[in-house]
Image (cartoon, rainbow, N blue to C red):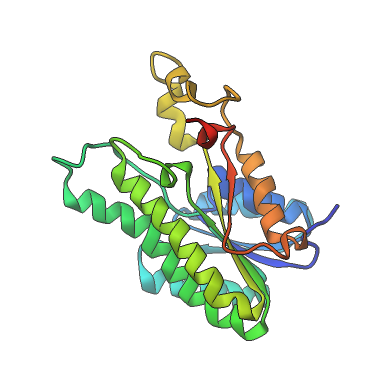
Amino acid sequence: MNQLEGKKAIVTGASRGIGRDIAIEFARQGADVAVLARSQDLLEEVASQIQETGRKAVVQVADVTDEQQITGAVEQAIADLGGVDVVVNNAGGNSFSSPVVGMRFSGWQKTQRLNVESTVHVLQAVGPVLLGQKSGSVINLASVAGLRGAPMMSHYGAAKAAIISLTRSVAVEWAWANVRVNTLLPGWIETDLTQFLRDAPDGGSGALARVPMQRWGQPGEIAAGAVFLASDASSFMTGQELILDGGLSAMP
């Protein structure tokens, strides 16, 4: 089934991992897709796979932490696609762990800039278009780290909690125009960003200890959730969180 037939989508952080799988799955489901990230080479590889499905691919190289770059890239992507129906704010991540005491504040700021401010930049760029056409679906990627305490990663947990709150607020602001805004929350997913955990002496069993399903999630499983949020199957859903974490957040 082509659940996204004829739709035009923008996916940030699309050069690898979850973003890559979302972009490719959107194309398989019938969407033309603009992919945004910093790596031209990796984006070209993703674009090639999108084109193999018979859909249009647009490549835009930009650093999402730079307001001017991301605004220009989004505007050009919309022009090249001929419009936009779906926006996925996937760009983000975390590069360190530290207790609050002793954390360099520059690290805190970098994490907020990458995860939160980048999302705001994209929302401000696409908002006028979506509101003007009175339709659209926005999917913001957060994490289960934003739902509970994140010891040694308070900077990341706080950023993802901010995304959840931001999503709810914007969803209410944009609901009048039939523009839906939801959050997708992955748990432990098997990507490059979690490779260091699987390379640990315990093979990653420590990370999975509190995951009831006792396995790593796959990027394709998150992509399936994104398709649901982008499609008409979720047409009466806005301001909500779709959690895909193998049961981790259900644990006491």
Q: Residue furthest front?
A: 252
Q: Position of residue 194 (x, y in %)?
A: 45, 32
| Up/down of 33 relative to 179, above or below | above
Furthest residue toward right: 1
Q: Nearer the viewer, residue 71 or 214?
A: 214
Name, please, the residue furthest toward the top. Answer: 201
| Residue at (28, 54) in percent of width and height | 110
Residue at the left extreme of this rendering: 102
- In the displayed structure, 77 sits above or below 35; it is below
Residue 48 location in percent, x, y?
67, 52
Q: How many marks?
A: 0
Q: Residue at coordinates 47% horizontally, 18% vertically from top-left?
A: 205
Q: Is residue 199 above or below residue 97?
A: above
Q: Residue at x 25, y 56 (%)?
A: 109
Q: Position of residue 13 (x, y in %)?
A: 50, 54
Towards the viewer: 75 or 215: 215
Residue 200 x, y percent position in the rendering: 39, 19
Query: Taking the image as drawn, is residue 212 in sight?
Result: yes
| Closer to the camera in the image, 188 or 118 | 188
Q: Is residue 154 above or below residue 188?
A: below
| Residue depicted at 53% across the width and 26% down the height | 211
| Residue 75 makes an appearance in the image | no
